[in-house]
Amino acid sequence: MVNFCSQLRHLPLLLCLTGLVQWDLCSSQRLVQIQEGPLYRVKGYPISISCNVTAFKGPAKQDFQFKVKKSNADINMISTFDPNFSYSIFADRVRIKDIEIKMLSGSSVLLWIKNLLEEDAGDLICETPNTDGSYWGNYAAETKLNVIGDTLEASYSGSPSKSLSEGDPLQLECQVSSQTFQHTHLSVTWFLHGEEDENPRPIITMDKDLTVKPGAGFEDRYRAGLISMDKVEDTTYRLKMPQVQQSDQGKFFCKATEWIQDPDRSWTQIAYKNTTACNVEVKLFLIQDGACLFGWSSAALLFICMVVCLAS
């Protein structure tokens, strides 16, 4: 009886030690995690899906492989360590790098698909080969990838060109809509591609939450009310510039982007389209009075022009 009571006194300590050992074992289990699904992505566009592994033993650089489960069959897509891993349905695309794995770190990767196809849909599995010495933990994770059709539409139906003088107003409209069954948001940006611009410059954006923000270099004019953007009814996005400048000369177009909120609450761009452009010519300030014709825009030169005209 005494020995039994003595053993009972040590029971809490034994339970505590057992719990600590189990916690230590669990905390060191390998864990593979893939981006939470279901994910909805649009056919024909590039996509990326993240996967990472933690609490692993072995080399700091881990290997990864991806499969797609269809009708209870696993179809090998791509591997970081086996060049012959891919099944024929994916082999050519892997060879030309239409499908590839991009390493973010030794334990984290992105599956990158440049041109998403319908056959990419299914239960996407991310696996890591065992480097732990013994099997302990989770070596694979999966997510659901759905491939949906492209219903985003963006168009500009105005005049293909406009000729203005400095100080004239400019108003342009583009129509943007999407018919997807998923809950998505749209953002629209008006761009200007000037003659000396290497790349188009964003003028103003109406974001997916309907907030409006100017592009770099247009902030002062936006704050002064000289650039604005309105959504008219459901599909029309109107750019207004009450007084154009000579630097505004170039091609104007708008870009529509469709966004979806993933299960992890992040917003992902799933489709985008550019409209045709309107070529805007901005002439320097013009004064014509008999034989006096000047194309100068500065106040000083304008004053000289007026003096010469009056003297004539």
Image (cartoon, helix red, strand yellow):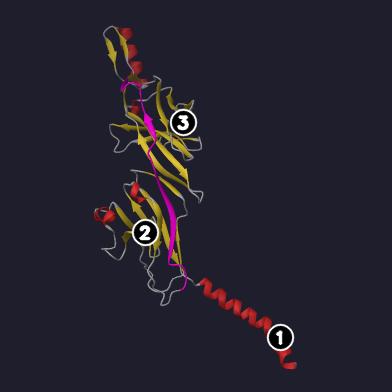
Say which residue label 3 marks.
222
- The number of numbered badges drawn on the structure is 3
- Locate residue 5: give its quadrant: bottom right
From the viewer's side, name the closer residue of 305 and 102: 102
Helix, strand, or loop for circle 1?
helix
From the viewer's side, name the closer residue of 78 and 13: 78
| Coordinates of residue 130 in the picture (x, y in percent) | 39, 71
Q: Is residue 212 visible?
A: yes
| Coordinates of residue 139 in the picture (x, y in percent) | 43, 67
Say which residue label 1 marks.
8
Say left or right for 177 vs 93: right
User: Which portion, as a residue range, is magenta?
Assistant: 136-162
Name the outermost residue toward the front.
71
Residue 269, label in figure: none
Residue shown at the point (68%, 83%) measured from the top left: 11
| Coordinates of residue 50 in the picture (x, y in percent) | 41, 56
Helix, strand, or loop for circle 3?
helix
